[in-house]
Image (cartoon, rainbow, N blue to C red):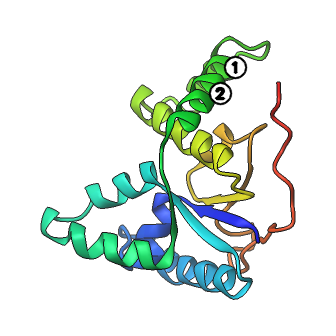
Amino acid sequence: MSIVAVDTNILIWGVQGKARVGQEHRIEEAGELLNVLGKQKASLALTMTTVGEYLAGLPEARHAEAMDVLQKRFRLLVYNPRCAMEAARIWRLKKHGANRELEKHRIDFPEVTSTKIKADVQIVATCVAHGVNVLYSADEPLLKMCEGYLVAIPMLSAQGVQPRLALTEAPPDNSQ
């Protein structure tokens, strides 16, 4: 069975049913994506970094209820020592590797903070360490961070109506 992770934005739109002004259409789209993935018998997963970001947007009084819902619908991927080692490896390769990808990332996405970059690295590392096949997100900097480590798919195709499914794709070989 394929393991498919979804990012915070999809979780907020598809589970919580909330969106910023101008993004209301994302609620239905994210809900449909989660339904399609569920029908394909994919094991839907969340990293604990994603869970933390999701909970941060809710009143503390709702955290227990939200965790109950998430635990019933998703496989929760714990950030463990293997994930930490993977994150360190990804960070080192992106910062000091031949392509200096981290420098390019900061140029391409100047609004992204160091804290956000580190959270994205943790998400990618957790997915890699837990054998996730695909990560869906609407977060362009996160999608870019996945390159070379994980099959990352924008939430929707360019047409904006059909989820692009890639459950049979193998994750990239990242054994550098």
Farthest left residue? 61
Residue located 67% across and 22% down the image: 94
Quarter that holds the C terminus: top right
> Pointer 2: what residue?
90
Mark 1 residue type: Leu
Dot 1 crowding, Cα within 10 Å, few <14, some 14–19, many 20+? some
Q: Mark 2 falls on what kind of element?
A: helix
Q: Mark 1 falls on what kind of element?
A: helix
Quarter that holds the N terminus: bottom right
Q: Nearer the viewer, residue 67 or 32?
A: 67
Mark 2 residue type: Ile
Q: Residue 10, percent across and down?
A: 51, 67
Residue located 78% across and 71% down the image: 165
- The answer to whether residue 69 is above or below residue 119 is below
The answer to whether the residue labelled 2 contacts the one labelled 1, judged by CB atoms less than 8 Å apart, is yes
How many angstroms separate mark 2 from mark 1 (CA)?
5 Å
Q: Residue 170, percent across and down?
A: 86, 55
- The answer to whether residue 139 is above or below residue 80 is below
Residue located 39% across and 80% down the image: 17
> Pointer 1: what residue?
93
Quadrant for residue 30, please give it.
bottom right
